[in-house]
Image: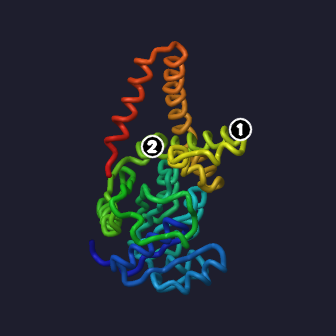
């Protein structure tokens, strides 16, 4: 992709910090400018070698940007886009890293001037840890990144955002924003709800049991350690799709329970084998 004159990253946490580190390592921008909400975070970020400037306001950070990456929690994305809209130079593109896309894409696009396209993004990368202190330049390597343009988004802007994520090592998939929300409700948001619910259920049992757990419980529930407020925002934004996914999963769980209740072990084995076949086909 062509070298960018300035990448601006607003509210860098784990993902935003990793974007800055990866962009610095890839050498795809003349300048990397950050803005963080907390003054103490801005002070620490100024000491990092992978950014050139840390601005005191979102507007100042966006003023000379070629590409703005909004890396805030999902409920803060549209307010931040609205806040910087009047400060963007003509032609600057705005994207994000939020895990919900439908309403964000429509409201963010509406908040911007016609000369500043919004092209939503969602890298399927991260961990249960939060904060730019845990960020790495390798976070996006061989990870899927959804790019979710609206039907009337300029093709050149979409190509720029796709090229940007390719340069950071991601494998890009372009989908409609609402289709994205349906997909991630099943492959990301539902697993979070299940892991969280399992730990919440076990927390009501004898606390000593957790000391006997092997790798299976640890692997199954790793994401239960995620930040509750971040996930509250995600589930609020994608509520309808998550509810549909939960209903379908409840039907699946009910079928398993019925097979066990009826001593239909052929059906139990069939369901276990179907699950194993799906898991065995995951990418390395």
Numbered label attached to residue 205: 1
SS of the residue at dot 2? Answer: helix
Task: Estimate the x, y position of residue 201 in percent, counting from the top left.
Answer: 66, 38
View extreme (top): residue: 262
Q: Residue at x 38, y 47 (%)?
A: 176
Answer with left or right where residue 205 lies relative to residue 223. right
Q: Is residue 245 above or below residue 31?
A: above
N-terminal of the pair, mark 2 or mark 1, is 2
User: Where, quadrant-wise, is the N terminus in this rendering?
Assistant: bottom left
Q: Residue at x 39, y 73 (%)?
A: 22
Answer with left or right where residue 236 lies relative to residue 265. right
Residue 58's image quarter? bottom right
Q: Residues within 10 Å of mark 1 (few under 14, many from 20)?
A: few
Task: Estimate the x, y position of residue 142 in percent, counting from the top left.
Answer: 33, 60
Q: Is residue 212 above or below residue 41?
A: above
Q: Is residue 221 above or below residue 96?
A: above
Task: Estimate the x, y position of residue 151 in percent, counting from the top left.
Answer: 36, 50
Numbered label attached to residue 143: none
Q: Nearer the viewer, residue 254 or 38?
A: 254
Q: Residue at x 33, y 76 (%)?
A: 26
Q: Is residue 187 above or below residue 125?
A: above
Q: Residue at x 56, y 76 (%)?
A: 35
CA separation in Å, label 2 and label 1: 28 Å
Task: Estimate the x, y position of residue 209 in percent, counting from the top left.
Answer: 66, 42
- Residue linked to disc 2: 187
Answer with left or right where residue 182 lies relative to residue 157. right
Q: Nearer the viewer, mark 2 or mark 1?
A: 1
SS of the residue at dot 1? Answer: loop
């Amino acid at each position: 992709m062509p070298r960018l004159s300035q990448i601006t990253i607003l509210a860098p946490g784990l993902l935003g910090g990793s974007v800055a580190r990866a962009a610095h390592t890839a050498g795809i921008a003349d300048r990397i400018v950050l803005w963080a909400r907390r003054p103490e975070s801005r002070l620490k970020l100024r000491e990092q070698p992978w950014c050139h400037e840390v601005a005191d306001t979102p507007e100042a950070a966006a003023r000379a940007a070629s590409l703005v990456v909004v890396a805030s929690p999902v409920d803060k994305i549209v307010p931040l886009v609205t806040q910087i809209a009047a400060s963007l130079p003509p032609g600057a593109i705005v994207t994000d890293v939020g895990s919900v896309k439908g309403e964000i894409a429509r409201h963010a696009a509406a908040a911007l001037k016609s000369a500043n396209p919004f092209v939503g993004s969602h890298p399927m990368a991260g961990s249960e840890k939060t904060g730019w202190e845990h960020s790495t330049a390798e976070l996006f390597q061989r990870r899927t990144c959804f790019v979710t343009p609206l039907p009337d988004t300029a093709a050149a802007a979409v190509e720029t955002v796709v090229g940007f994520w390719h340069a950071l090592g991601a494998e890009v998939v372009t989908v409609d924003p609402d289709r994205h929300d349906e997909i991630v409700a099943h492959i990301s948001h539902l697993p979070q709800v299940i892991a969280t619910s399992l730990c919440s259920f076990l927390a009501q049992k004898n606390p000593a049991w957790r000391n006997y757990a092997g790798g299976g419980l640890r692997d199954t529930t790793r994401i239960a350690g995620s930040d509750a407020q971040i996930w509250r925002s995600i589930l609020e934004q994608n509520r309808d799709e998550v509810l549909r996914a939960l209903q379908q999963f409840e039907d699946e769980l009910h079928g398993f329970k019925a097979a066990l209740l009826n001593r239909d072990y052929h059906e139990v084995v069939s369901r276990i084998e179907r699950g194993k076949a799906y898991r065995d086909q995951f990418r390395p």
